[in-house]
Image: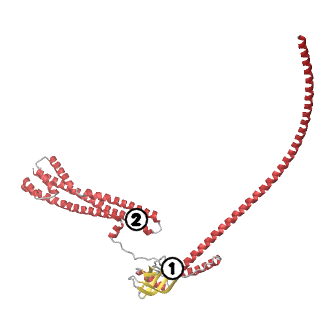
């Protein structure tokens, strides 16, 4: 058994030795082949790298050339764009200039048309049209800048039409002379003229008709003859109040009411002040001659604040002086409420009137701004209503407040003087009576 195993192992070793030799030869052969392939590949790689470097250099050179060409083309395109923009700008300027020239020509033609100058507009030859426009304008300007006399008709102040001479100062003023009538003319509508109520302008009209220039020129300058210059109307008090609206009438009503109160208080204070001294003297005479009871009977027939104060004084003459003075002061305080009647109401109206004027001012300005928002400021007549309310109400408020403040303070001072007079009269009776004791 061992021999068999040994034999098998020897056979296997011999087989393995033979196989390893064949493998080595195969590996050597394959290695030589691979080495040859490696050399060929390295050579091809070297050739490829060399060719690639040449191509890259050539491509870089071509790219640099192309970039220069692109740069040149870009600069050329920018230059062409700038030239195109300049051309477009020039075309736009030419269009604007053409439109401006056309507008000037059309406006000039329409401006000359009312003066009888019919301008022929040639759209294909604007320079010639402009030359004609300037020539006609210079001729017309020369005509309108002179004073010339022509025959014509104008209306008198009573509405009758009169034929005579028209002395025209260019196209801004005119005078009319016919028989014994002369004076400045104003537009009457429909390209007609009428005599203005200004007698002092007759001298200027006659002097200009003789190509003379007076030292003082009475002239009425107008814009055109299409409008109508209305005669100046004198506003009455009612018109002024109406222009102030409802607030104006409220202020006037309060002012009238306050004036009525002032009148009533004046009448009351006049009566009270005029009776103090006579009643005091008569009472003192009766008191000294007939006594206290007779003086009280005498005072029963008298009316008024002074009589009531003196009556309270006489009735308490038997008391001590300090007590009597307190009674007199109380009686005067009792009469003060009557003597101060209407005074507070008058001062309230005097304080409220300017506030109502301020309210009217705010209301008028709001109305004015509403009109401006809706219609703009093109026509000043639209704004006159709100401005009239704003100003007239303020004026009415001050016109009512200022006199009422003065009269109210004067009446208050008058009432205080009457009170002082009653107190003085009562103290005089007390002093005279104490002398007799």
Q: Nearer the viewer, mark 2 or mark 1?
A: 2
Which of the 4 image quarters holds residue 140? bottom right
Against 188, residue 378 (above or below) is: above
Q: Position of residue 339 (x, y in %)?
A: 21, 56
Against 120, residue 273 (above or below) is: above
Q: Which residue is at 27% across, 61% downward?
A: 407
Judge the density around disc 1: few (<14), some (14-19), many (≥20) Cα neighbours within 10 Å. some
Q: Which residue is at 16% across, 47% downward?
A: 322
Q: Position of residue 164 (x, y in %)?
A: 45, 87
Q: Is residue 17 visible?
A: yes
Against 202, residue 413 (above or below) is: above
* Viewer-proximal residue among 368 and 392: 368
Q: Relative to residue 417, is residue 230 drawn left or right?
A: right
Q: Relative to residue 15, is residue 198 drawn left or right?
A: left
Numbered-mark total: 2
Q: Is residue 396 visible?
A: no
Q: Relative to residue 73, is residue 292 drawn left or right?
A: left
Q: Relative to residue 21, is residue 370 drawn left or right?
A: left
Say which mark, if any, is on residue 171: 1
Q: Which residue is at 34% across, 60% downward?
A: 356
The coloring applied to the image is secondary structure
Q: Position of residue 23 (x, y in %)?
A: 90, 26
Which of the 4 image quarters holds residue 38? top right
Q: Position of residue 380 (x, y in %)?
A: 45, 68
Against 426, residue 264 (above or below) is: below
Q: Which residue is mark 2?
A: 386
Dot 2: element: helix
Say which mark, if any, is on residue 138: none
Dot 1: element: loop
Judge the density around disc 2: few (<14), some (14-19), many (≥20) Cα neighbours within 10 Å. many
* Viewer-proximal residue among 18 and 167: 18
């Amino acid at each position: 058994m061992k021999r068999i195993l040994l034999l098998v192992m020897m056979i296997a070793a011999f087989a393995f030795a033979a196989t390893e030799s064949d493998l080595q030869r195969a590996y050597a052969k394959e290695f030589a082949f691979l080495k040859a392939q490696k050399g060929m590949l390295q050579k091809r790689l070297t050739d490829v790298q060399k060719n690639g470097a040449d191509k890259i250099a050539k491509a870089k050179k071509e790219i640099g050339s192309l970039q220069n060409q692109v740069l040149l083309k870009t600069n050329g395109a920018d230059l062409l764009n700038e030239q195109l923009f300049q051309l477009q700008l020039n075309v736009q300027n030419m269009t604007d200039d053409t439109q401006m020239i056309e507008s000037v020509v059309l406006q000039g033609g329409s401006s000359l048309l009312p003066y009888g100058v019919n301008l022929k507009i040639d759209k294909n030859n604007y320079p010639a049209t402009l030359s004609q426009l300037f020539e006609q304008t210079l001729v017309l300007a020369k005509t309108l800048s002179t004073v010339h006399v022509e025959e014509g008709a104008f209306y008198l102040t009573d509405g009758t039409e009169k034929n005579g001479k028209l002395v025209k100062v260019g196209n801004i003023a005119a005078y009319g002379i016919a028989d014994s009538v002369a004076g400045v003319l104003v537009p009457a509508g429909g390209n007609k003229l009428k005599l203005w109520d200004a007698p002092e302008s007759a001298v200027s009209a006659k002097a200009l008709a003789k190509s003379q220039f007076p030292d003082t020129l009475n002239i009425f300058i107008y814009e055109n003859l299409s409008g109508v210059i209305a005669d100046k109307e004198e506003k009455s008090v009612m018109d002024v109040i109406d222009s102030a609206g409802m607030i104006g009438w409220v202020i006037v009503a309060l002012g009238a009411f306050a004036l009525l109160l002032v009148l009533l208080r004046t009448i009351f204070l006049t009566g009270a002040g005029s009776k103090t001294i006579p009643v005091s003297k008569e009472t003192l005479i009766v008191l000294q001659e007939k006594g206290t009871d007779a003086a009280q009977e005498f005072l029963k027939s008298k009316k008024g604040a002074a009589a009531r104060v003196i009556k309270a004084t006489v009735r308490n003459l038997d008391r001590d002086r300090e007590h009597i003075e307190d009674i007199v002061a109380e009686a005067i305080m009792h009469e003060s409420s009557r003597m101060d009647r209407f005074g507070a109401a008058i001062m309230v109206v005097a304080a409220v009137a300017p506030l109502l004027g301020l309210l009217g001012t705010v209301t008028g300005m709001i109305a004015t701004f509403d009109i401006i928002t809706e219609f703009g400021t093109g026509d000043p007549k639209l704004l006159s209503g709100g401005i009239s309310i704003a100003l007239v109400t303020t004026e009415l408020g001050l016109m009512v407040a200022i006199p009422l403040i003065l009269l109210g303070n004067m009446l208050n001072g008058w009432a205080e003087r009457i009170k002082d007079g009653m107190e003085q009269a009562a103290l005089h009776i007390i002093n005279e009576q104490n002398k007799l004791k």
